[in-house]
Amino acid sequence: MDEVVLLIPTRSVAERRLMRAVEKLVSGVNLKVCRDADGLRRRLLPGRHSPLAVVILAVTKQDLLSIMPLRDLLLGFRVVVILPDSDDVTVAMGWGIWPRFVSYADGDFRDVAGVLEKIVGTAPLHMKGDTGQWASAKHKR
């Protein structure tokens, strides 16, 4: 089954809002939640079924810092980052992960759900359920 992986290291009200928004708009996709960067790393290692997208909910700057070591690993995936604030340093760190889309933790996440719906809906049929990474993700940003 197609899968979207969510990294949600800190339980929060934002987590509940994100899950509600995503579950409403992205149907027919398994949502896999990882609670720490190491769990996400293990989930994304080669040889496993590649997710259609990776969503990172960073409700604190520490959450964002914890995933920075995974930058290179994330390059092969369609990444959505939700930042804790719009501080210049935070935004620079968030874009340093090379995401497809950036949002903020104080929103309602309809924008994130819409982006995921588009990713899931436009996933090439030969890539859905494939064990390889998105072929185009390494070359298109």
Image: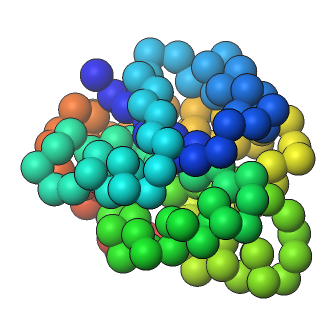
| Image quadrant assignment for residue 48 | top left
- How many numbered marks have been drawn onto this rendered protein structure? 0
The reply, left or right, for residue 31 in relation to residue 26 is left
| Residue 126 seen | no
Residue found at x 54% / y 66%? 66
Most extreme residue toward the left, as rendered?
47
Residue found at x 17% / y 51%? 132
Q: Coloured how? A: rainbow
In the image, 125 versus 132, the foreground residue is 132
Query: Where does residue 135 sit, x and y in percent of width and height?
Result: 25, 60
Q: In which quarter of the image is the N terminus?
A: top left
The reply, left or right, for residue 125 in relation to residue 30 is left
In the image, 100 versus 60, the foreground residue is 60
Q: Determine whether 123 is above or below 99 in the image.
A: above
| Image quadrant assignment for residue 115 | top right
Residue found at x 57% / y 61%? 100
| Residue 105 seen | yes
In the image, 26 versus 11, the foreground residue is 11
Query: Where does residue 120 sit, x and y in percent of width and height?
Result: 47, 34
In the image, 65 versus 93, the foreground residue is 65
Residue found at x 75% / y 36%? 12
Q: Determine whether 127 is above or below 41 in the image.
A: above
Q: Determine whether 25 is above or below 90 in the image.
A: above
Query: Where does residue 15 sit, x and y in percent of width and height?
Result: 70, 34
Query: Where does residue 102 sit, x and y in percent of width and height?
Result: 70, 60
The reply, left or right, for residue 81 in relation to residue 109 is left
